[in-house]
Amino acid sequence: MSPVLYRLHDLISESDGNSLRSLLSSFTCSAEPAAEDFLKNIAIRHERNAVSRTYVFLEQNRSDKYVIKGFFTLAVKCLAVNECHSIPGDVLEKMNVDHGVAQAYLLGQLAKADGTEKWFGKEMIEHAFDFFSKGNDMFGCIVVRLDCKDNLLGYYESCGFALTGKNSNGTLNQMVAII
C-alpha cells in the first residue's frame, strides 16, 4: 500500500490530541534530527498559529496502524537578495526582485522516516511543488526557497534548486527554484 498525503490541520481536527501526539512522536529521522524535532514539538503549534502548513504521508502497516513515511512543511518567507548572492542570471531574471527582496514560498521542512525508500524525498518535493503551483495560479509568486546543510546541496541541485549563498549567520545554504 502506498502512503497517503494528509494535511496536519485535518489530522488535528479529526483525532484526539493524545493519539495524534503519539503518531507524531513515533516518527524517526536520524538523517535530519531537527526536522524530527520540528514534527514532534513544533508543527502543531505552527499549524494552529498559521505560521506554516505541514503535510504528512501516512501508510498502514500490517497491524493496521498508521506510520509516518515522511512529511514536508510549506510557508511564505521573503528572500533578501543582495550583491553577495550568487544567483544564476536566468534564475535572478525570473525572481522579480524589488528593493532587494524577492517574494517566495518556503519549503521549510522535508524529512522521510528511517528505512523509507531513497526516491521518496523527490516524490515529496513533487507534491510540495504541486501546492506551490496552485499558489502561483492564485497569487503569482514563482520562487521557492529552502535552507539546507552543505551535505544536501547536490541533492537539492538535482531537484532543480540553485544555490544563492549562505543565510545571514552562515550556517545554512539558501537555495531557490522557479515554479
Image (tube, rainbow, N blue to C red):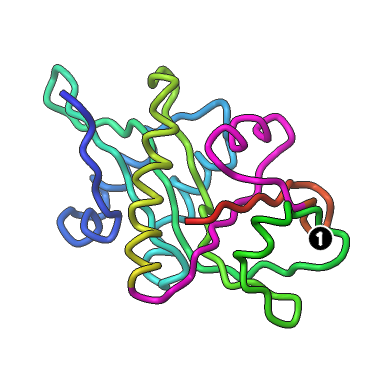
Q: Quadrant of the N terminus?
A: top left
Residue 127 sits in quarter: top left
Residue 81 sits in quarter: bottom right
Comparing 43 with 41, the one in front is 43
Rendered position, 147 above or below 28:
below
Q: In the rendered structure, does residue 147 fall within the stretch colored magenta?
A: yes
Residue 109 rendering spot, x and y as whole percentages: 51, 48
Residue 168 rendering spot, x and y as whole percentages: 81, 60
Residue at the image point whose x is 41% and y is 17% from the top: 115
Residue at the image point whose x is 37% and y is 59% from the top: 133
Work out which residue is located at the far left of the displayed protein and give it.
64
* Magenta-highlighted residues: 138-164
Question: Is residue 140 shown left or right of residue 173?
Answer: left
Question: Is residue 69 shown left or right of residue 142?
Answer: left
User: As shown in the figure, which amino acid type bears the numbered disc 1?
Assistant: Ser
Comparing 116 with 30, the one in front is 116
Reading the image, the residue beneath label 1 is 168
Rendered position, 165 above or below 13:
above
Q: In the rendered structure, does residue 31 fall within the stretch colored magenta?
A: no
Question: Is residue 163 shown left or right of residue 77?
Answer: right
Residue 72 rendering spot, x and y as whole percentages: 42, 46
Secondary structure category for the residue under label 1: loop
Residue at the image point whose x is 41% and y is 72% from the top: 50
Residue 156 sits in quarter: top right
Comparing 119 with 172, the one in front is 119
Rendered position, 120 above or below 141:
above
Residue 140 rendering spot, x and y as whole percentages: 44, 74
Crowding near the residue tagged with mark 1, few <14, some 14–19, many ≥20 C-alpha atoms within 10 Å: few
